[in-house]
Each structure stands twice: as C-alpha cells, then as structure tokens.
Amino acid sequence: MPLALPASGISIFKKLMKASFHTLGCKLNYAETAALERQFKERGFDIVPFTEHSDVCVINTCSVTERADREARQIVRRALRTSPNAFVAVIGCYAQLDPEVIASIDGVDIVLGASEKFQMFNFTESFQKFPAPKIFVSPIETVNDFGPAFSGGVDDRTRAFLKVQDGCDFNCSFCTIPLARGGSRSQTIEACISQARQLVSMGYKEIILTGVNVGDFGKNENLSLLNLLRELDNVDGIERIRVSSIEPNLLNDELVDFWLGSEKICNHFHIPLQHGTDEILRTMRRRYTSEDYHSLIHSIREKSPNAGIGVDVIVGFPGETEELFRNNFDFVHELPISYLHVFTYSERPNTPSINFDGRIEPRVRYSHSDQMRILGQMKRTAFYRSQKDLVRPMLIESSIEDNMLSGYTDNYVRVRVPYHPALENSIVMVRIKEIQNEVCDCEIVSIQSNQTIINPLLPIVNSATL
C-alpha cells in the first residue's frame, strides 16, 4: 500500500524536494508519467523541467525499437550530468524487459517494472541515493493491475489523456508490448466516466482515449469501445473526444458510423497498417488483409471526405524484397490518407521475427524509410491543401510562437491564429488559409457561444461572432 500522508496534507519530507520527469514513446507513457507527477505533487514535491537540477529524476522508457533503448540510456546519463546527486528511477517498457542493463548504468538507483512503477513510494521514503541499484520487476505473466488511469494533458489545461486500456493479446511477430505490458485489460466504464468528469472540472476541453490496444476495450467484460464512446458522448462538459489509435480489424461499420455521427468525437482516425502486402502482413501476424484495410480507409473517406486519417507503416521487415517494398509504397501512395508515421524495423529480443529469414541490410532499411517519409510529407501537404478555405473547429492551445497561438482542428490539421490571451483553451471556428512549414495559418470566423471572451478581443478578431 502507498505511504499514508499526514491528515494535514503536509509533506512527509523535511524540505521541499524537486522532481523531474522524462518520457519516451507513446501517448500511454505520457499519460502514465503525468499520473506519476500527480503522485509526487500530492506528496509535496516541486515538479521542475527535466533540464533543471532536481533531487529525483524519473525516466519513463520505451522499447519499441533498439533506438528507443539507446535513447533511454542516453537520457539516464543526461539526467546525471544535470543532477549528479539525484535519485534516479527508471520505469516503463525497457525497464520491464531489460532491467539489469539499466541497473548497470552508473548512478541509477531503482528500476521498476510494469506492476511496480506506480508504487515508487513503497520502495523509498527519503529518495536518498542507494549504495547499489535495486530492481523490482515482477514477471509479466503476473501483471494484471491497471494503475492510475487519467492525467493532465500535454498542453496546459487544454488536452488530457484518459487511459482506458492496457496490454495486448495480439502478439504480432515484431512487437515487445505484450512482453512489457502483459495481456489486454480495461478500466470499467464507470471509472472512465468518473475520471472524465474530473478532467472536465479541471478545465480540460479535449480528452484523448489512450491504451496499448484501445479498440480491445472491455472485451473481457463483454463490452466494447462503442459502449464507452456512447457513455462519454453523454457526459456534460466534454467538448472533444479523440481516440489515440485503433486497430483496423476492430473498427467496424457500427463504430465508424457512431464516431462520425457524434458532435464530440473528433473526425480523426489513426489506424495502423504496418504493411501494404499480404505476404508481409502474414509474417507480421496481423489480423487483416491489405484488401480489408483498403476497403476500410475508402469507406471512411466516402462517409467523411474531410476526415483526418493517420497510418503507421513499418519498412525493412524480414523478407521485404525490393518488389514488396515497392508494392507497399504504391499501396500507401494510393490510399486517401492524411499523414504517415514511418518506423524502421528493429530486431527486438524474444520476438519471433528476430529469427526470420530475409534480413534486410540497415542501409536499405534507412533508404526505404526515407522514401516512405517523403511520401508521408506529400500526403500531409496534399491533405492540408485540400482543407484550404474550409471552416473547422480548432482547440487553441497555450503555446505561443511568433505571436501566434497554435492548436489542432477536429480532423487533426495543425493550425495557428494571431495571439490573444482570451483565446487560450477556447474552441473557435477557423477558416484555413495558407500552409506555412507544416502548419496552416487561419482566420477566426466565430467563437463558440459558451466561451467567455473579453471585449478587447474585438479589434483583433474582427469577424468573431460573440
């Protein structure tokens, strides 16, 4: 059990200690890091940027590629250069998969696995450096807890993550996630709704549903993601709901139709493809064919011509000949999508694909990755251009650059408008104008009637409807 706090709420620590956090990897990792930050705040810690000196450094790692492993080791060393005497805790997927390697880095104090990462205060009270590193990592077969499920967002009081699912049962041949996070499990709908309401009360306008395999939500309780979305759609105060990612075989017509028919769910889908040929999809152990994927994307596009559609694709998988790469490239080129996330295949320990024949030379992998990334840039630019002169809702974030406020439309176009403090964390209707370095300049055409905007805005937003 976590350490009990004094009834007065005063920190158990003698002095105000500083803690910093660094996150690698997916949105789920960011959600869990933010939940940990909340634990530290509740215990009286001052949360500071990772680049500043701190007493405790927490590094939440990813292990999707060898590059992610290498970056995690670099981040640990960077933390120790900034804060040589800091207590260093390493958590996350890499910590679960290879704790001894992490513990061997000079200066690391504690390595926590999937079951232990939210119980840090059980393992130390003072956060004074240990004489030798300690490892607390349970076998992944025993991991069935869920952990904190909601967090503040990456954007200041704008977007928040709601973790609704964890783990995966799909066991794709290249993936370490089941080894690092265990089997698929979900939070109850009741808990999701309660936490969503709490996020609304904290001022967040957009809630991002996250997990390892969000489309698998509720399967162990004979429920589905559709059940959850229907309940969230009825929660007063939620203005936007976004789903981080969903597997193509879990996105059926009923779910798509509800998604597109909701006024709250963002008109944005992120649907991993991984490869556009059936030969590679089979060896990857994916659960659909290229024709299934093709039909799904075209069906969404026909129902919603302006939907944002993002795709994950892997290049350099074992057995991917030049012909198969070209077929993959052509397949993606034809798809009416909005953007690409391109991953270069990386051999991961204890995955089936590490023993597959047909290993692709690194120089070929990187060359193919570059080609696919250029295609992704072309797809994004073409989609942005297709949105020119259209009016879309934009959630304005508090980031300021060149006297502009930026944010995303509901269909995931990066946009910006002239700065005004009264607009931060507001949803406004914008007309998309010109593309400037992967962001679109916009003009505001109206402001939601429930937004409170002060009069000095009028000279800046001349066409605003107040």
Image: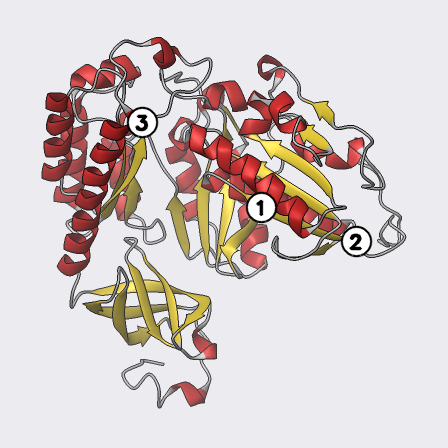
Quarter of the view holding residue 300: top left
Q: Hey, what amino acid is under mark 3?
A: Leu
> Is disc 1 surrounded by few (<14), some (14 to 19) or many (20+) residues within 10 Å?
some
Callout 2: SS: loop
Q: Is residue 215 above or below residue 24?
A: above
Quarter of the view holding residue 256: top left
Tag 2 near tag 3, CB within 8 Å: no
Callout 1: SS: strand
Q: CA distance from mark 1 to mark 3?
A: 32 Å
> Is disc 2 surrounded by few (<14), some (14 to 19) or many (20+) residues within 10 Å?
some
Question: Which numbered circle lies on residue 250?
Answer: 3
Determine which residue is flagged by label 2. 17
Q: Hey, what amino acid is under mark 2?
A: Met
The image shows a total of numbered marks equal to 3
Q: Hey, what amino acid is under mark 1?
A: His
Callout 3: SS: helix
Q: Nearer the viewer, residue 456 or 433?
A: 433
The residue under the point 82% across, 57% down is: 16
The residue under the point 56% across, 35% down is: 73
Q: Is residue 67 left or right of residue 41?
A: left
Q: Nearer the viewer, residue 229 or 384?
A: 384
Residue 444, position as x, y percentages in the image = 29, 75
The mark that comes first in sequence, 2 or 3, is 2
Determine which residue is flagged by label 1. 22
Q: Is residue 9 left or right of residue 387?
A: right
